[in-house]
Image (tube, grey):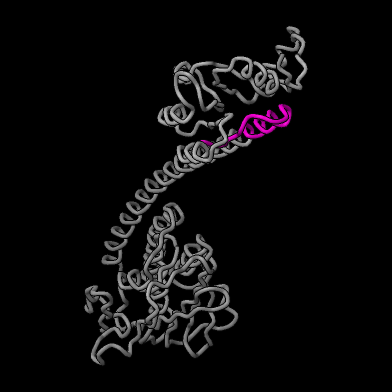
């Protein structure tokens, strides 16, 4: 007689069986060519009514069964007559890649454990010892593996729902934006004709206000197109210099860059950050001639400073400039800058002095940047006649950027 340490259970009444079926939350397939062990494991695992265990003595039968029935997890012996447990694991993974698989075996060799985990087993448990402890460990492994799978499935489903919702919202927004722009274009067309036919100066003043309002509506529609993309694509490692070089430079402004060869983990819309900072300097900085990009490591991480030689920003406006709708024009540019950077935990602040030019400080936390080359890109290495000091750099045989993109007017 085999001593198991587990008392045989009495037969369940019809009422108990119905309650058992209602409370089952784990459906398990156990494959082993030792029938007595299948019976013992089934009795123990089903004891609290939370697991339903199907037992089979053939690995081939198990493969056929998972094609017909859905299980939350598979337990398998290693050494069986028709197929070993590692081969069964490989076959299961080819059919149901994420189905939790637990290898439960007498074999204690390291190579078996390594092969199990190499091929995707969730747990490896060795038979033997106190049966109560052993089957409790097995039950815990099932709960952990199934729970982890369910969390992953819930996350995937949630992501799918979010993607579908985003697509629907984006489609609705695109249609609405298209219709708004068409209507605004119609308004501007009729307004142009009315202005030509109207001679009253007072009426023409109202026409100018209407035209300004129509332009603001068009600008807001354009902003919404950009903003709805923020955070939708996965963040990427982006080369700051490359992104900066791709931005159009406002007429009359020279860019001076003194940056290391740095990559930061940011939203793909990082280019909009630099574009809006340059546009902000041109529109609101007064008489701006130069915008300087510099960078240095600090206790907070890496700091990129974007400073201009314009009129600066007063202390009472330093935080408000990032609020949606604040300021002249659309009031959206710096709001968009902060929102794009915040997606990956990057912050921005204005730290210049009124009358001494604006100075925006972008703080990239540690772990969100990597410096590819220790040598700094400095304007000192460039010829004096170069239109954009600091950006014309040849590193590791890379061709220099097109200087025409950065020439000052």
Whether residue 225 is situated above or below residue 136 in the rendered picture: below
Q: In which quarter of the image is the N terminus?
A: top right
Q: Position of residue 297 (x, y in %)?
A: 50, 78
Residue 202, compared with residue 54, is above or below; it is below
The residue sitting at 24% across, 87% down in the picture is 386
Q: How many marks?
A: 0
- Quarter of image, res 35: top right
Bounds of the magenta segment: 121-143
- Quick check: 143 left or right of 165? right
From where the camera sits, is residue 371 visible? yes
Residue closest to the eye, 236 or 29: 29
- Along the viewing direction, whichever of 339 and 154 lies nearer the viewer: 154
Where does the image place residue 63, in percent across and percent down from the top left?
45, 20
Find residue 67 and report its horizontal and vertical position in percent.
44, 19
Report which quarter residue 245 is drawn in. Answer: bottom left
Q: Which residue is drawn at 49% across and 85% down?
A: 312
The image quarter containing residue 41 is top right
Residue 129 shown in magenta: yes
Residue 67 visible: no
Quadrant in which the C terminus appears: bottom left
**Rendering coords of residue 199 (x, y %):** 30, 70
Residue at the image point whose x is 32% and y is 77% from the top:
250
**Relative horizontal placement of residue 359, taking residue 48 as reference (left or right):** left
Of residue 233 and residue 35, the one placed in the foreground of this image is 35
Q: Does the magenta portion include 160?
A: no
Asked if 123 appears above or below 401 in the picture, the reply is above
| Residue furthest out toward the top | 14
């Amino acid at each position: 007689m085999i001593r198991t340490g587990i008392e045989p259970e009495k037969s369940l009444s019809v009422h108990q069986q119905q309650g058992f079926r209602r409370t089952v939350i784990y459906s398990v397939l156990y494959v082993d060519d030792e029938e007595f062990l299948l019976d013992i494991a089934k009795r123990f695992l089903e004891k609290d009514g939370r697991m339903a265990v199907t037992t089979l003595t053939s690995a081939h039968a198990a493969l056929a069964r998972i094609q017909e029935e859905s299980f939350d997890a598979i337990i398998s012996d290693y050494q069986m007559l028709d197929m070993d447990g590692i081969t069964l694991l490989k076959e299961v993974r080819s059919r149901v890649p994420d189905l939790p698989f637990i290898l439960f075996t007498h074999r204690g060799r390291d190579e078996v454990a390594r092969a199990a985990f190499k091929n995707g087993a969730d747990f490896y448990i060795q038979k033997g010892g106190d049966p109560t402890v052993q089957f409790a460990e097995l039950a815990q492994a099932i709960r952990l593996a199934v729970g982890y799978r369910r969390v992953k499935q819930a996350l995937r489903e949630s992501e799918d729902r979010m993607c579908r919702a985003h697509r629907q919202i984006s489609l609705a927004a695109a249609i609405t934006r298209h219709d708004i722009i068409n209507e605004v274009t119609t308004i501007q067309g009729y307004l142009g004709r009315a202005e030509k036919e109207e001679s009253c100066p007072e009426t023409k003043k109202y026409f100018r206000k209407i035209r300004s309002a129509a332009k603001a509506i068009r600008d807001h529609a354009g902003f919404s197109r950009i903003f709805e993309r923020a955070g939708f694509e996965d963040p990427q490692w982006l080369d700051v210099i490359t992104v900066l070089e791709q931005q159009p430079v406002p007429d009359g402004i020279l860019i001076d860059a003194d940056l290391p060869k740095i990559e930061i983990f940011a939203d793909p819309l990082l280019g909009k950050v630099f574009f809006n900072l340059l546009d902000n300097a041109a529109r609101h900085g007064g008489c701006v001639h130069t915008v300087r990009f510099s960078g240095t490591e600090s206790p907070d991480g890496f700091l990129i400073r974007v400073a201009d030689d314009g009129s600066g920003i007063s202390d009472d406006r330093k935080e408000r400039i990032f609020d949606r709708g604040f300021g002249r024009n659309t009031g959206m540019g710096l709001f968009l800058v902060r929102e794009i950077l915040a997606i990956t935990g990057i912050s921005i602040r204005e730290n210049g002095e009124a009358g001494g030019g604006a100075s925006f400080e972008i703080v990239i936390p540690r772990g969100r940047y990597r410096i590819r080359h220790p040598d700094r890109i400095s304007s000192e290495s460039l010829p004096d006649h170069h239109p954009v000091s600091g950006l014309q750099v040849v590193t590791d045989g890379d061709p220099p950027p097109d200087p025409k993109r950065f020439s000052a007017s």
